[in-house]
Amino acid sequence: MSTIDWAARAADLRPDGRALIDGRRVEAADGQTFAKHSPIDNRLLGAVVRGQAADIDAAVRAARTAFDDRRWAGKAPAVRKKILQRFSEKILAAKEELALLETLDMGKPIQYALSVDVPSTARCIAWYAEAVDKIYDEIAPTPDSALALITREAMGVIGAIVPWNYPMIMAAWKLGPALAAGNSVVLKPSEKSPYTALRLAELAIEAGIPPGVFNVVPGFGHEAGEALALHMEVDAIGFTGSTRVGRRMLDYAGRSNLKRVYNELGGKSAFLVFDDFKDLGRAARTVAGSMFFNQGESCNAPSRVLVHESVAEEFVGLIAAEAPKYAPGDPLNPATELGALVDETQMKTVLGYIDAGHADGGRCVAGGQRARAETGGFYVEPTVFDGIRNDMKIAREEIFGPVMSIIRFKDEAEALQLANSSSYGLQASVWSDNINRAHRVARALRAGTVHVNQYDEDDITVPFGGYKQSGNGRDKSLHAFDKYTELKTTWIRID
């Protein structure tokens, strides 16, 4: 990777911002577009289709026709598997192009777009391809006079609405199980990061996925996203984004056809460090790496770090020493660890939370400033606050930026009370060398995933999702098929 001149490649790139409906690149029905700029330096990347209700309707009609005529759903699972495997292979073959689009679109370092986002996307598609002909249906226990078959069927047309922080990976988490099960999909990427979704759809068609099965309509949430969620021919919505918009998704379902809504929403994940854990340096390195990865723009970022008061001073010192290692840099430089925030609005939001931390009495021990302003891009230093209380704004609300809050506790009971006193319940982490405490605390934490003495380990084989206002349903693993299939019972009388 170090031999590639990413800046030169970026200068030559001319991304296609047209929608993809029924297997073809198309302009918006009314011709509208919006200008897409890169957060790296605010350069203009191009014009992107501004999808409206008419464009969503065209995509949904194409998806419905494709589902009804069984051009995809009617294929044998083994055939769908082979096509999805080719799709995965094409993603890997286009890895440099996709990584560059991702970096230019939302500002993440090119080294991670290439080493994490592209391979994770390809693995997700390949894993669901492999899974689809390994899932068996059931026969219920009945008397001799009956046979009761319990089968999974594709749901129909799936609307997928994904965020800008991991555009490809979040799309793949919806596409993998939805397509493998035989559904048709209309994907609405964030207006802040539309390009890789559009390119993925082209690669899918090249791999053999029939026209109409996978459609992409870029646009704004209040226009294209709302139209998709309200559409009467959409059977389910898979949404990843903010809790605020997740509430709207439920409202849209109630106002339309009561479509299923699966929300993967925000988080304010707690990272609990107990005084019996001896390798504080490893805990500090782990939480810094997890918190500042992807510029802190991760729903599962461990932004609330709860530390036992007897080791807090040492731990704060270790964290303060780690933060400068993540100094913001040019995302097109392969050595950069922390890139640009997605746009100016997000940068101002993050800086506003930093101001709130100061105003509420927090002590900033690292970072806290805008960086690289001379580039025209949107960068914020990795920031660490000590002396935070759980009722402060920066400890309650999801920031989606590189801002960590350190909260001190006296004992295990207080640690659990603080950790669970959140409207979110996505992830948590327990650091203890006492196996009883590790199990006890892990069981008591109200979170969809609890890590013990680690944080950043993950795989497509395990479910992802949260408790409380972090959402419902699960992405990843075989459990994701539950979101995109219907269960049918067929009773047969035997004479």
Image: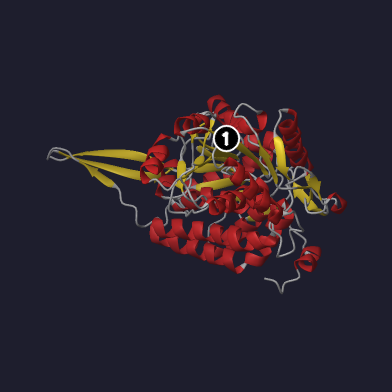
Q: Using the image as rendered, state which of residue 459 and residue 138 is in the foreground.
A: 459
In the displayed structure image, the side of residue 131 where residue 160 appears, left or right: right
Up/down of 128 relative to 185, above or below: below
Residue of label 1: 408
The residue under the point 18% across, 40% down is: 141
Q: Residue at x 54, y 50 (%)?
A: 280
Residue that protrudes farthest toward the bottom in the picture: 3
From where the camera sits, is residue 231 visible? no
* Residue 245 picture location, percent across and down: 62, 32
Q: How is the image coloured?
A: secondary structure
- The residue most toward the right is 374
Report if residue 298 is visible in the image. yes
Q: Amino acid at mark 1?
A: Arg
Query: Position of 253 compared to 327: left or right?
Result: left
Instruction: Give the left or right position of residue 482, taking residue 377 as reference.
Output: left
| Closer to the camera in the image, 355 or 265 | 355
Please provide percent x and percent y for residue 207: 54, 64
Between 226 and 458, the one lying in front of the other is 458
Mark 1 burial class by Cα count in 10 Å: few <14, some 14-19, many 20+: many
Q: Locate the C terminus by quadrant.
A: top left
- Determine the secondary structure under disc 1: strand
Q: Which of the 4 image quadrants contains residue 163?
A: top right
Q: Vertically, is 9 above or below 427?
A: below
Q: For this rendering, which residue is in front, 106 or 189?
A: 106
Q: Percent from the top left, x then y, of residue 127? A: 45, 58
Q: Measuring from the top left, give residue 331's x and y in whole percent.
A: 73, 58
**Total count of labels:** 1
Placement of the N terminus among the 4 image quadrants: bottom right
